[in-house]
Image (cartoon, helix red, strand yellow):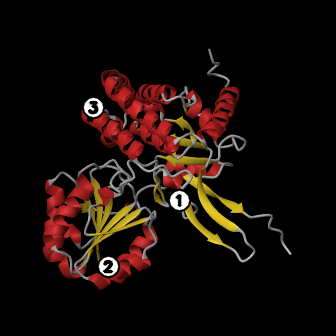
Amino acid sequence: MKDLTDIPALMHDIGVRAKAAARELAFASSERKHAALIGAAEAVWKNRAAIVEANAKDLQYGREKGLSDAMMDRLLLNEDRIRGIVDGLRAVAEQTDPVGAVLTEWDRPSGLHIKRVRTPLGVIGVIYESRPNVTADAGALCLKAGNAVILRGGSESFHSSSAIHACLVDGVVKAGLPEDAIQLVPTRDRAAVSEMLTMTDYIDVIVPRGGKGLVGLVQREARVPVFAHLEGIVHIYVDKDADPVKALNVILNAKTRRTGICGAAECLLIHKDVVDTIGQGVVKALLNAGVEVRADETLRAIEGTVAASDMDWGCEYLDSIIAAKVVDDLDAAIDHINTYSSNHTDCILTEDDAAAAKFFERIDSAILMRNASTQFADGGEFGMGAEIGIATGKMHARGPVGAEQLTSFKYIVVGDGTTRG
């Protein structure tokens, strides 16, 4: 039995075993990885009742901690959501294996033939908060890309993540891959997070997935390279040439479909020319849907809104709240977004191609959208099967991080007794 109180020794052991597993996974066949993920999907579905039972313990823990409704929604697993986990595992399984893919190749006058080929990163550490489905998404994507993974889930999702992890391991072992390919840190102790951040001998990259507090901690303390995943301060700008029906449908979906995800709209910007038409309609529809609208001085004229403060610009609510502001023109909208955006996802609603092109050119977020709900900011919706997060930095990976983004590359250089003069 492992001593769960000696965190440095526990994490050292996990790191050693992950490194050894990564060496085997680097050359594991596509067929075995496919079999492992299909087996994991079957195990999740077979054990869905046990997973729901484990989730009930987590929900009780969350209630006792006083989690918000949005956070409780993130934590909840039911049969439909478990079916989504199964579908995600199967979708990743069916993707083309990125490992070994030739990115480009060329010949040199010296006689050398050079290829750039995808390779696994090695060992990936994933630190996440309350969403237990990340256990499956991260485990599957890392495995598909030939990486070992160390998962450190949130304390709120401890039981759910453990139940899902057991299913992943079941699939891995039955496929003849190393059991340590997917490891879950078996303690709620926060010291395990700090330990992971300094495990430079064992972990090649850290992926944080959670709120501003977690990501800030990781970026401050990590000695291991980090895929940045900042909060989703998501803006929607309603241009003067927006279609009113599209605007209403997109904004309601972007805010209310699920308020607790990083692609949920948090700030609405409305061109002054359409305040009395589209603006009125959209704000009233949000209010009717139960959304608290924190409005600037102009929009405060709409009954039911509350006054916005300076703190509302650049705020990720993850709740049924949206900030709303009137802007003079497209340039003012761009300026506001560049000031307050977290470079996650931003959207323009317009029928004007030139306005959309300018918006896309001058805003530097990982995902930019036109006339589409920001709730599509998701690896599954991008055709990646699942995602390990939305990277908002600019180094290595950006936007939804799928299996391809969890690879590096190496150069294969072939000569024929070739020497350099």
Between marks 3 and 1, how big is the CA–CA gap? 32 Å
Q: Amino acid at mark 3?
A: Asn
In the rendered image of this protein, does residue 288 appear above or below residue 173? below
Q: Residue at x 38, y 31 (%)?
A: 62
Residue reaching furthest to the front = 416
Residue bearing mark 3: 78
Locate residue 307, reporting x and y percent.
Answer: 28, 63
> How many marks do you count on the picture?
3
Q: Mark 3 and 1 residues: CB-CB less than 8 Å, in contact? A: no
In the rendered image of this protein, does residue 38 appear above or below residue 213? above
Which image quadrant is residue 163 in?
A: top left
Question: Which label sits in the foreground, 2 or 1?
Answer: 1
Q: Amino acid at mark 1?
A: Ala
Residue bearing mark 1: 397
**Residue 340: which numbered mark, if any?**
none
Residue reaching furthest to the bottom = 354
Locate residue 227, reporting x and y percent.
Answer: 56, 54
**Residue 356: which numbered mark, if any?**
2
Label 2 crowd bin: few (<14), some (14–19), many (20+), radius 10 Å: many
Q: Residue at x 33, y 47 (%)?
A: 260
Along the polypeptide, which appears first: circle 3 or circle 1? 3
